[in-house]
Amino acid sequence: MSQARFNAIDTILHRSEIDVDFIDTPSEKITNYFGCNVFNEKAMREYLPEEAYLSVKAAIQAGSKLSRDVADTVAEAMKNWAMDKGATHYAHWFQPLTGKTAEKHDSFFTIDPGTGDALEEFEGSALAQQEPDGSSFPGGGLRSTFEARGYTAWDPSSPAFILEVGEGKTLCIPTIFVTYSGESLDYKLPLLKSQTTLEKASIPVCQMFDKKVTRVITTLGWEQEYFLVDEALYATRPDLVMTGRTLIGKHSSKGQQLDDHYFGSIPERVYAYMRDLETECYKLGIPVRTRHNEVGPGQYELAPMFEECNVAVDHNQLLMDMMERVAKRHRLRVLLHEKPFAGVNGSGKHNNWSMSTNTGVNLLSPGKEPGKNLRFLTFFVNTIMAVSKHADILRASVANAGNDHRLGANEAPPAIVSVFIGESMTNILNAIEKGKTTKDDVKRVLDLLSKIPNLQLDNTDRNRTSPFAFTGNKFEIRMVGSSMNCAAPMTALNTMMATQLRQFATDVENVMKKDKDQDTAILTVLKKYIKASAHVCFEGDNYTAAWAKEAAKRGLSNLPTTPEALDAYVAKDAVKLFTDNGVFTEKELHAHHEVMLENYVLRLDIESSTLEELYLNYVLPSAVSYQTRLAENVAALKAAGVREATFQKEAIKRIGDNMKKINALAKKMTTEKAKAHKAKSSRAAAIAMCKKVKPLMEQIRVCCDDLELIVDDQEWSLAKYREIMFMK
Ligand code: ADP
Ligand code: MG
């Protein structure tokens, strides 16, 4: 009989209250320490000479390179600031295609080769560029053709920060990660390029309404869902440890059906975790604001104030890292996987996206004045149009093995990309589409538009089932997986929007050539777009089978699995879109596609191997042992002259049947895996894993879960769902 599970339960029951006493939540106001570990404006002003400070600011705004002199000055200032805070090392911090963050630490300390003196040093060259041995990061074949080396290069648009790990403090410099010849090996470079192309495309459109607009940034406010489980129970589950999700496990009788967890009171231990995490976030300048219980038992959510997209992406990556670190301090484990438990909601990340100008305008805010509403309407309709044309690319940008359990299964949101805009906006678009756009009608439409803010009030009706929803003053992409880097969908959306806005500017210009004034031209074009993109708008319940049918009729794709969904990245129109905008070269696109496919295959490989261990080392031994006890009981009864043992005999048979099935399925799985490994391409391997191996894993799971139901609880060695989800 396995003791591990019971020891774990015992550990939890005896976790002393002092366990959380070490948390040092400052009693000061948050504003006193917010951003104290960030080389922000305040630190720059304090540590940089005025002139250098101004050049850095100008370079960040213009996205231009800093001179070597200025870089040296900045490096010196950063070093002094960081050392004053107790940092001993610095690291280029980057976001390779693993989805995690990476860092390689070097000390400021060095020996002067001339004098032999010990000194602390950090030069501009070390700030600007580093050469981590990149050969172990996924590159999709990009490097092997050139050089194995990878380079990280400083991204001054995201502030450096100090990462505190225990007593260790490291100055982290946000960087991009590229090959020897400058091809991107990370999520950041394409994101930055997509922001540049979008800004360039949107300024002329903004200037149709306001000549003072000279800068446009994209904004991102993510919402992060996650599960927390006790570390003792976590440790008893090889599947959680190895894959981040449970590969087997009978549903507990109570899951989320009573809806009593959503927004419920936060358990004390979790509350302590949240506060500790929030403190870490504040120090790092991550403006977290909301926290609450999510739908699943043991599931929570956290969201910040939105920020400039690049910084928000960094902050989300940093947050995920901090979540894991802080959880360990609390004897908890955070599960960022998209689907840790079957039968209860998975976890997503909602990317709230908008654009705003140097004049302080949110381009997706309906505003109050009719003239400005036309600007709102322009960006609003163009976003819908962009998504309607490139829905498949958006879908591809959120494809991974974990997210298939959400998008591809009967869970929110679906794999069909549609746009929810709410009743009032639907009415307005309908009215515009039907109205004639003669000169007089412009006035009428503008009048109509002036009603948007009022209509908006009754439009709090948030369609929770939609993958892409307009929520008052921003669009919310709900398809993003909880473990993902936010950058990929942001890159896709920014890029498609850039192309769309350029098209819009041309279309408006062409109508104006026909002697129309600008407002009329804009409305004429928008009217055309509203019609052309109507098929992607859907206001109903996205979970229903009826929608899947309707969507098919409308010609919308439904790509439930990663290998299929990823095809869109390398389709002709994607190549054109990304290369036209200078976001990816065709080669980079293929390389990134390859990395995603490889990642999919590897993850399924790890999952199926872990499943094998589970049934061989845990499930079958428990089953055999209980079956033996039953058989002994039947024999004992027989010896005592009792013939009746129906339950025992049926249970013996049921156990036997399940074991027999597992055995047969396991053999098939081995064969199918071997075939997948021999596949000619990563795509073929991924499809084989998806279509052949994964279904077998599901079938094995069914047998294991049935055994869990029959076998004596005392004999079952793996922590059960009710324990993992509910015990804290
Ligand atoms: P809900 O859970 O209803 O979707 P939340 O209030 O939890 O809403 O999340 C809203 C998110 O949207 C927050 O992260 C917020 O910062 C973000 N947000 C608000 N305005 C903008 C904007 N203009 N651009 C990007 N994100 C925004
Ligand atoms: Mg949301």
Image (cartoon, helix red, strand yellow):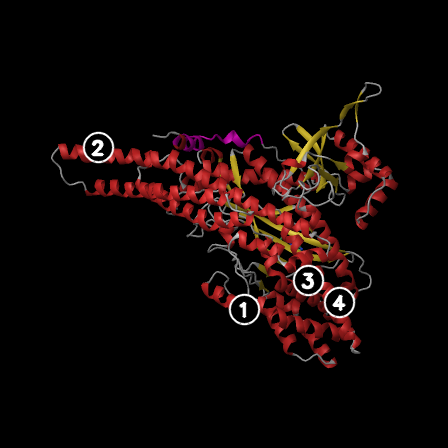
Determine the CA span between mark 1 and mark 4: 28 Å
Snapshot quadrant of residue 98? top right
Q: Is residue 345 visible?
A: no
Which segment did they paint magenta?
A: 6-22
Marks 2 & 3, CB-CB < 8 Å contact: no
The type of residue carrying mark 1 is Arg
Q: Residue 178: image x %, image y %?
A: 71, 42
Return the mark for residue 632: 2
The type of residue carrying mark 2 is Glu
If you read the primary sequence from the N terminus, does the residue marked by circle 1 or circle 2 appear first? 1
- Camera-nearest residue between 263 and 248: 248
Q: Residue 392: image x %, image y %?
A: 59, 59
Describe the element under mark 2 as helix, strand or loop.
helix
The type of residue carrying mark 3 is Ser
Closer to the camera: disc 3 or disc 1? 1
If you read the primary sequence from the N terminus, does the residue marked by circle 1 or circle 4 appear first? 4
The residue beneath circle 3 is 365
Describe the element under mark 4 as helix, strand or loop.
helix
Whether residue 121 is situated above or below residue 645 in the rendered picture: above
The residue beneath circle 4 is 505
For image coordinates 73% across by 77% down, the residue present is 443
Whether residue 170 is situated above or below residue 571 in the rendered picture: above
The type of residue carrying mark 4 is Ala
- Camera-nearest residue between 447 and 226: 226
The residue beneath circle 1 is 554
Q: Is residue 357 visible?
A: yes
Ligand 1: quadrant of the figure: bottom right
